[in-house]
Amino acid sequence: MAAVAFVALVGAAAFRAAPSVLIDPLHTEFGWSRGTISAAVSVNLVLYGLTAPFAAALMERFGMRKVVASALLLVAAGSGLTVFMNASWQLILCWGVLVGLGTGSMALAFVATVVGRWFDARQGLVTGVLTAGGAAGQLVFLPLVAWLTERHGWRPATLSVTFAALAVVPLVLWLLRDRPEDVGTTRYGASGHEGDARDVHTPQHESNPRHGPTPQHGPNPQHEPDSRSAPGAPPVHGSQRAHSPDNASNAKRAHDARQVHDPQEAHDPRHARPVAASGAGGPVVPVPGGGAAARALGALRDASRTKTFWLLAGTFAICGASTNGLIGTHFVPAAHDHGMPVTTAAGLLAVIGVFDLVGTIASGWFTDRFDPRGLLAVYYGLRGVSLLFLPLLLVGSVQPPMLFFIVFYGLDWVATVPPTVALCRKHFGADGAIVFGWVLAAHQVGAGLVAFLTGLVRDVTGSYDTAWYTSGALCAVAALMALVIRRSPERTAAFHG
């Protein structure tokens, strides 16, 4: 299943290779300013992020296969229609809106959903591997798009993206499945009946403290009473044990299994959306909800009452600003400003994709073993330092210092994703994938804002230097923010009911 998800992410990532290569050709043919073209990129990046949390909820309601296939068709439609445009608003509609909605519907929230449903062990490593799918797509398509643009023009280049997205659709419809139960298996890493979703319904399982209790429809004498049945008592719930380090994953498996195998609970409004985790030592309160939008907004409401959410969203916004928004969109035209051929600059950006694969997988391995907060601080701090040196490295040819920058930036590019996903899962429990979707929305808002502003800076000043220095300083701020994220999940009124 991870392999199918990886290929789907590669297909969607094809479009990410296009913007940086096509800015100059569109400017030359239509006379549009870099700010105007960057505005379309900005809309794309913002919608990519804002769509993600709703897409995660839609995957819960309609299944991953339908959502991912529809997303790939949107990417194909948006990129294909681009070849007929003759006005800037059409660029924003096709390149910005359609492709933004499509790529956002199978963004990193898709990764978090696959990992949460299919893997009990090695979650950090699998997150890194799947996240690297985007880097692999860039590695494959960036040189191709640059070569096609130089030899045949930008229209054949965009059509290559269309065909890539369409080619993945049959594979998704044929092989992608929503849950392990659909193919008669259990989550990877689950052992014995403890990992078998069918066993959570036996009385022995429900009374076994190793597995964590299940939510009850009435008072349960086997567990401590909650604060409503014992006024003045500490707010202790039976489901509270499910969020201890030993029982969190078992309680999550039990919850997933009840959603699939218990028809009575499926129609009970108390179980219409997964519970929201309050954190270590805090209760788990069912949150009523209806459709995908209600669930996504409910998760945002609860998460936004914690400082951790805003720190994660803030750091990830800076991550998006310094990667997709800045380097991903403007590195090629910036290098071209200094006399470097477009194909050479695009090749360097593709090399970033090569080392992105290595860095992201390594970061997933580290996330399984080290404090994610410390990893984020290191990643952001080193990224900021490298950006401060970039203006000195941009020349007409590729020199060793530039190669060092490319290798390092590639290793660091998406390394922030596995620890960020891990922190969302740790602090927000069953809603972790949807909360990560909102954190990803912040990532893309930051990317979209910087993509647009950097284009304006280039139009006004004739240089990208201000953008490099500002982004480097922001990365230093992100490193400090990562260090103040709480080690343990917060206990707030939002999760106490």
Image (cartoon, rainbow, N blue to C red):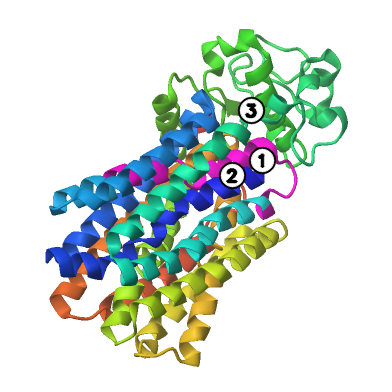
Q: How many marks?
A: 3
Q: Residue shown at 59%/64% (left/top)?
A: 357
Label 3 – label 2 distance at C-alpha:
44 Å
Asked whether residue 378 is in view, the answer is: no
Residue at far front of view:
152
- Membership of 283 in magenta stretch: no
The reply to whether dot 1 and dot 2 touch (C-beta < 8 Å) is yes
- Say which residue label 1 marks: 1
User: Which numbered disc, 3 or 2, marks the residue that appears first in the sequence?
Assistant: 2
Rate crowding at label 2 as few (under 14), some (14 to 19) or many (20 or more) other CA atoms within 10 Å: many
Q: Which mark is residue 5?
A: 2
Q: Residue shown at 75%/35% (left/top)?
A: 247
Q: Magenta segment, principal secondary structure?
A: helix
| Relative height, residue 348 to residue 80 (above, below) | below
User: Which numbered disc, 1 or 3, marks the residue that appears first in the sequence?
Assistant: 1
Q: Which mark is residue 234?
A: 3
Q: Residue shown at 85%/36% (left/top)?
A: 191
Rate crowding at label 3 as few (under 14), some (14 to 19) or many (20 or more) other CA atoms within 10 Å: few
Q: Position of residue 366 (x, y in %)?
A: 68, 62
Q: Position of residue 87 (x, y in %)?
A: 12, 52
| Relative height, residue 372 to residue 476 (above, below) | above
Give the magenta-colored segment's residue range.
Answer: 97-125
Q: Position of residue 24 (x, y in %)?
A: 24, 70
Asked whether residue 426 is in view, the answer is: yes
What element does badge 2 sit on?
A: helix
What element does badge 3 sit on?
A: loop
Horizontally, residue 9 falls left or right of residue 313, namely right
